[in-house]
Amino acid sequence: VLERPDIKLWAIRQEHMLEDINTIDRAMGGEGIPSLHRHDHMPGRAPVTTKYISPEGINNLCRVLCEEIQLYKEILRRAVNLQQEDIERYIETTIGKTCPLQTSVAQCSLLSNQTAELH
């Protein structure tokens, strides 16, 4: 799909689900979905049990997930319902907090040069 620029992508981010659904609905001629309330239609989040992952473990996860992170960034950037400045801010505040190197590059092969420079 990403290789075909003629295909429109719509993105619904979990953290902004209602906002994104309403934006898409309005773009398609609807009036939004004012009756959709999180507590009425969406199950609550399960309680989070804190799990510790070492900084080295986080770095390894970011490295292994690099291709998926790049694909996710591309989907967000291609989404017709999201504003470019919102996308970049979202990438910085979500991916950037945990995997800052993956936020700043467009290709995972570039990371091998950057991580080599860090050691």
Image: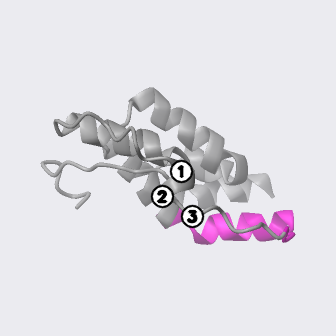
Q: From the viewer's perspective, is residue 35 above or below residue 68?
A: above
Q: Residue at x 22, y 61 (%)?
A: 1
User: In terms of depth relative to the viewer, which is nearer, 74 or 38?
Assistant: 38
Q: Residues within 10 Å of mark 1 (few under 14, many from 20)?
A: few
- Name the residue at 48% across, 58% down: 41
x%, y% of residue 38?
Answer: 53, 50
Residue topped by disc 3: 43
Disc 1 and disc 2 in contact, CB within 8 angstroms: yes
Q: Which residues are magenta?
A: 50-67
Give the residue pinned by disc 2.
41
Q: Confirm whether residue 106 shows in the render.
A: yes
Residue at 81% in and 58% down: 119
Towards the viewer: 58 or 34: 34
Q: Residue placed at 25% from the left, 35% from the top?
A: 26
Amino acid type at circle 3 is Pro
The residue where tag 1 is placed is 38
Marks 1 and 3, how far apart at CA: 8 Å
**Which amino acid is tagged 2?**
His
Whether the residues at callouts 3 and 2 have beta carbons within 8 Å, the answer is no
Identify the main secondary structure in magenta: helix
Residue 112 image-quadrant placement: bottom right
**Who comes first in sequence, dot 1 or dot 3?**
1
Label 1 amino acid? Arg
